């Protein structure tokens, strides 16, 4: 490429010369002040360049809808690579571009539903035996999740959405079991009312199908926590408004993402065991003629009003030190309307 030394004039009308690293346009005076061996970009009329940002954007666009040849090339590079960092970068890239996100049914993406390993009968029994003692806490990786990962999903799950919906329902059912179990430590006079309220919560949850729609990409936009394509974004720790690391995952993409998503938590901002359940029990004991607003506690325990979906790295297990709103524990007293005395006509 020839450039006029005095005016930095380019041979193509309307073209411009920019620094590769940041897109700075080179003028006649500035051209001779740049360091030797600087990388330059020649832009024709209408083209733009923002430096490394443009390069990254082109890279991302290329892999947004990768061709088979791109996947094959990435696999070849990975097989020949020995440097650990480059291996990880290539493996992560290959994992992402190989996802079959748009597929939904078992027929469209069989590997998503299949087992991670295939074992003999004795080995399978050992897995079930080991998992039987695992607690089901309502969040995080459960024994059932591990069994599904190792042995594959049951035939009753005909599509991805049905399994993800079941996964969310299982977590919420676990929360309900924990709340119900607290009845055993509630005092005798209070226990009957506590059980009645928990039963009411259970009926409401069953009507809402245990809020399984949170993980179902086919659900209405207002009732799911993901995009229409199935992408979930970490909502950040309980004490932050957003995730600083921008964690995201699409469990609909492949089997590994499905299992990794099981380690994400539906975290209670106001803590369930330390705060909500004891406050509910205390409110029943001290209601003194007032009516406990159990639906307020229902929303704290089982809905996204108090639940945040967080990556395992953003799940802080410290005490949250947050309390229930004392103004919402009891329903406001009903005002009795006084009837006006009838006017006497002369």
Image (cartoon, rainbow, N blue to C red):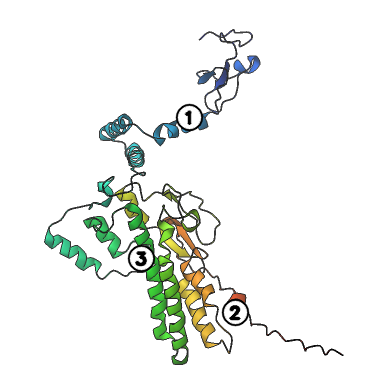
Q: Which residue is mark 2?
A: 331
Q: Earlier in the sequence, mark 1 or mark 2?
A: 1
**Dot 3 crowding, Cα within 10 Å, few <14, some 14–19, many 20+:** many
Closest to the observer, 165 or 125: 165
**Residue furthest to the right:** 346
Q: Position of residue 294 (x, y in %)?
A: 52, 77
The single residue placed furthest to the bottom in the displayed view is: 189
Q: Is residue 139 visible?
A: no
Image: 42 above or below 205: above
Q: Marks 3/2: CA distance? A: 30 Å
Q: Quadrant of residue 121?
A: bottom left
Q: Which mark, by number, is residue 55?
A: 1
Task: Give residue 49's quadrant in the image.
Answer: top right
Mark found first going from the N terminus, 3 or 1: 1
172 or 57: nearer the viewer: 172
In front of the other: 306 or 80: 306
What SS does tag 2 mark?
loop
Q: Earlier in the sequence, mark 3 or mark 2?
A: 3
Q: CA distance from mark 1 to mark 2?
A: 58 Å
Q: Picture coordinates of residue 151 (x, y %)?
A: 21, 57
Tag shown at residue 170: 3
């Amino acid at each position: 490429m020839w450039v006029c030394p005095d005016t930095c004039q380019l041979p193509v009308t309307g073209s411009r010369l920019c620094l590769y690293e940041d897109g700075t346009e080179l003028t006649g005076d500035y051209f001779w002040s740049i360091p030797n061996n600087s990388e330059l970009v020649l832009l024709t009329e209408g083209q733009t360049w923002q430096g490394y940002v443009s390069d990254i954007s082109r890279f991302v666009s290329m892999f947004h809808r990768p061709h088979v040849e791109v996947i094959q090339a990435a696999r070849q590079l990975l097989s020949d690579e020995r440097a650990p960092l480059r291996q990880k970068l290539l493996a992560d890239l290959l994992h992402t571009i190989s996802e079959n996100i748009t597929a939904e049914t078992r027929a469209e993406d069989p590997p998503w539903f299949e087992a991670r390993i295939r074992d003999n009968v004795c080995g399978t029994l050992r897995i079930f035996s080991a998992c039987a003692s695992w607690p089901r806490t309502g969040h995080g990786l459960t024994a059932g999740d591990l069994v599904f990962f190792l042995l594959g999903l049951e035939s009753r799950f005909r599509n991805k959405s049905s399994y993800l919906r079941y996964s969310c329902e299982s977590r919420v059912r676990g929360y309900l079991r924990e709340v119900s179990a607290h009845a055993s430590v509630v005092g005798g006079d209070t226990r009957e009312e506590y059980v009645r309220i928990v039963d009411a919560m259970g009926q409401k949850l069953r009507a809402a199908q245990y809020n399984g729609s949170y993980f179902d990409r086919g659900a209405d936009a207002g009732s799911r926590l993901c995009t229409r394509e199935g992408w979930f974004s970490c909502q950040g720790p309980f004490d932050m408004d957003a995730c600083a690391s921008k964690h995201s995952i699409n469990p609909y993409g492949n089997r590994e993402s499905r299992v990794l998503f099981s380690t994400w938590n539906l975290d209670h901002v106001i803590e369930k065991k330390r705060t909500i359940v004891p406050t509910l029990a205390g409110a029943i004991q001290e209601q003194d003629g007032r009516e406990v607003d159990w639906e307020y506690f229902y929303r704290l325990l089982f809905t996204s009003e108090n639940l945040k979906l967080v990556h395992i790295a953003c799940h802080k297990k410290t005490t949250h030190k947050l309390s229930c709103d004392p103004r919402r524990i009891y329903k406001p007293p009903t005002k009795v309307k006084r009837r006006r005395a009838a006017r006497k006509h002369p």
